[in-house]
Image (cartoon, rainbow, N blue to C red):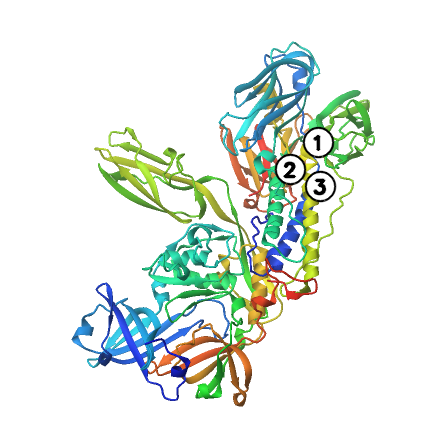
Amino acid sequence: MTPPTRAQITAPLTQPTYQVRIWVSGGWQALSVSDIQQVDIQHTTSDDLHGVAFGASVGAEGSVVVADTPTLRAYTWQLMPIRVDFGFATSDRVQAFVGIVTAMQRDGVTMTWTCRGLDELMRGTPVYTPMIAGHLAATQTTVTSAELTSGGIINVILWTCGGRPLEQQATYPSAVFYYTCHNALIAPAWAWVAGENAWDELQRCCKAVGGQIIQRPDGVIAYVNPLYFGAMSGTPFTFGGATFATVSLQGEARDIVASVRMRVTIRRMQGEQTVYEDTTARYVAANSTISVVCDLPVPVYDYVYAASGAPTLPSTGIVATDIWGVRATPAATLTQSAAARATIHIANTSSTPLIVSRLALRGRPVEAASDEQAIIGSGMPQLELGDAAEALVQSSAHAAMLGALYTSFYGVPRPIITLHTCGYDPDRIVGERCVLHDPDAGFTNEPVRIVAIRVHETGATMDVDVVSVAGLPTLDQFFVVDGVYTDTDQRYLGY
Amino acid sequence: MLLAYDYGLTFVSGMPLSAHGQLNRLRRAIGMLDMLSMRGRRAPTEYMIQPIENSDGDPTVLGRGSFQYRLGLTTLSVHVGLPVSSTIQIVLDGVVALSTTTSGAQILTVSLAGRGYGDYQVIDCVVQVTPHTGARGYRLYDAYVAPVSGIVGAPPALPAAMTSSLPLSALQALATLADWQMRVCATVTQSAFMGTLFQSAMFWPGQQLLWSGSIAKDNDADRLYLSLSYRVETNQAEQLQLQISGVGVATSPTWSAGQGGNYAFDISLAAYADGAILDIRLLQVVTTAEASGVRPHASRYSVVDVYTYRASYPYATPVAISDALEVLPFSTVRDRLNTMRSQLSAITTRIQQAPDVFDRMRLFSWIPGSDAGQIAYFGGECRTMAAMGIRAHDLLWVKGRDLALCYGPRSVTANLDAPYAITWVHEERITSGDAVETKLIRFDSYAGLFPGVPYAIVGPDIRFVHEGFV
């Protein structure tokens, strides 16, 4: 069979099919259909009531109710990878959810697996990155994009969590997950992550440069530039009155922003200096190795290595003696050189124990040099960006760009419009630009963007949250770099 | 309070041309670069005149100073005037780097290649005559390391003017050119001025040298500014005379006993050739000493700074400020960019045509003295000399022994028979003990030391004081 066609999807009477697969013993195993009692999944782009809020607050969630059988009960459910596929009797099924099981409840008859998307994996992943200087916060992923050397902080976080660019799937066929990124609009002066959970960092990044992180039904994590929120490609799908049962709308005044307040922390790279010093005595047994994790008080742009250029400590960086006090020079290799953490691997290849009495790392630290408050826009309500901005907003230009971005995207209410009980449509994905046309409900060819999809009844129906994107700026309205224009062409200047 | 220049402005193909992040940032950078590129020069102090007149040591020191080595510098140049054929030596960090016998006005050069200096290392330099035969009239006019172009490279190419597109290469080239200009300006920051703090002058009729140094006119900076403060204790009539190359060019008003205050010579150098070394001397001329029956006391002078500047600053008119989501015709956007391109071009030309200002880094002059006794006299016991500056940057490199950073309001107590007692509200130790230390300090670490605030580095052995950018 083939993937579902529009005719199959929009038929008056559909015959939904479903499949749940779990990762067991190194492979995907499909559950027996008879064991599956109920599957509900949802994908959202934000937990804010403002429809185009920046961030990565919510990814994907689901709940799978199965029979409480001895076989299923025997599986180690904690963090068990799980996939859900939906389709129709006359078509193949398509992947609708990718995640892990985060909670289990059973009552002797049924067992409910509560699932979350890949955000849950990233929440549990502390990330240390190198210092990234002046890159766009997210950079366009391509077949050849060099993520770790020229990627933005969002790319580096996703890569460090085990993701690989979707465009490089052929090169990395067994990645933990795939991701795809647009270019972001803003390049923070300095960006790094120092052990924070990756998902929270992604959210902060989005709030500090604009944009959203979403998880698509196929499990791909995507960073979406806000200028694509209202952008349309091809003929958009129209939600007409016949495609849903009822419609409701909710918004909150607090989600409107007239001005933005944020801390601007200007950072500067300092000259080469000792960035870490540790005089703890460490014993290294003969013919053995130890690893020392060094958490730096101030992140560094780079480290000073030995003259060879290899990531080894210069001889001045380590003081070691044998147990008789005779100076020794064990090899000390930096196995991790993140901005805020270095791991030194000390190898004693001699036949006598060594005592390491001093370790010192030299490098160029990036220090906060000035701290001020910026208020962009005027009037109330005023949004305080808090720690979302604190780490990444490091120049008045960044503050001005971000403030203008917030006021133009949050300047008018964009309440959530919920289309209840739509027929399940695997072609609809969060982030998609569509049209809502239901004059009876007050919507006439309203340009909308899907911000959440909640699939119920094991792939039979779904509720869809959309938000109006009327008036949102889109990329084609701007003068762009490398664009060709005539003198009278009128466009926006960017943020 | 940091320098508002951010390197590394980048453009990305297919992305919107940003108002705040790109156009305004470049506009602001150009405004700053325009100002910085019109700078003049500070005069190095030549202190050895008096010490050498009173010293016949072997060797006898003509001058001592320090420079900060940067990768790319190749040559140390020392301008000397030798009254008789003499063997002159240039000693770098205790090693004789040049020893030559010559006479007259000379520019001595020493290659810095292969000396093993590290980037940012402060190198001590001593210029000395050996043996000193007792001749008078040795001069040390100027000392600098060059070329700065070896550090920052040649200027990047100016892109073609934009016509019907916004080429990534052209936009990025503008940003790269601005970065190069800023690197030049940030690299050739000037050393602090080794000035005097209420040094003793004469209390008998006659004239005496108060200060000597030299400077050259360059970069259209055709005015000389020499600022000082004075206090006449008992002389009934005295004035200052400013000489250039031995010719009196200006005099102060005549001051009498009890008068004191600030004064500045502000004269035109338009008549002098660009690049010619101008020998500047400041003399105290006492015409009438104390009144009968009054116990005589020395007048006191502080020479605070000596520099050249422009009579007028023809700043380029900035392009209009851009706004996010501003709707414009392409011709306006293109014209803004092309105007900024022209302004960057003019700045590059200005930098390249003023090598004395932008291609040379002058040595910081030490407290004078050929021996420990003289050093102690000028630097310690009297605390007559201090490195003085007005904060214009983020950082301060210092090298020396037992140094303090002083700023804020100061009180001066006149001790008529001894050095004036000077105390600052803020006097922060930056080195301690007897060891000579090199330190990098951040101005922002000191409350109240904002940009534009004067400061002084005091101590018995000040070897290097140089502002810089982070």
Decide which of A107, A59 is in the foreground and name it.
Answer: A59
Q: Nearer the viewer, mark 1 or mark 2?
A: 2
Helix or strand or loop: what does disc 2 sit on?
strand
Question: Is residue B201 visible to the viewer in this orientation of the structure?
Answer: no
Label 1, on which residue? Answer: B303
* Amino acid type at image mark 2: Gly
User: Is A424 drawn above or below residue A180 in the view shown?
Assistant: below
> Residue A319: x percent and y percent?
33, 34
Label 3, on which residue? Answer: B38
Question: Is residue A162 visible to the viewer in this orientation of the structure?
Answer: yes
Q: Earlier in the sequence, mark 3 or mark 1?
A: 3
Q: Left or right: A235 with respect to B236?
A: left
Are the residues flagged by discs 3 and 2 in contact, CB closer than 8 Å? Answer: no
Q: Left or right: B288 with respect to B389?
A: right
Q: Nearer the viewer, mark 3 or mark 2?
A: 3
Decide which of B456, A326 is in the foreground and name it.
Answer: A326
Q: Are both tags, 3 and 1, on one chain?
A: yes
* Amino acid type at image mark 3: Met
Q: In whole angstroms, how far apart are the C-alphas of marks 3 and 2? A: 19 Å
Label 2, residues with CA under 10 Å away: few <14, some 14-19, many ≥20: many
> Residue B352: x percent and y percent?
67, 37
Label 1, residues with CA under 10 Å away: few <14, some 14-19, many ≥20: many
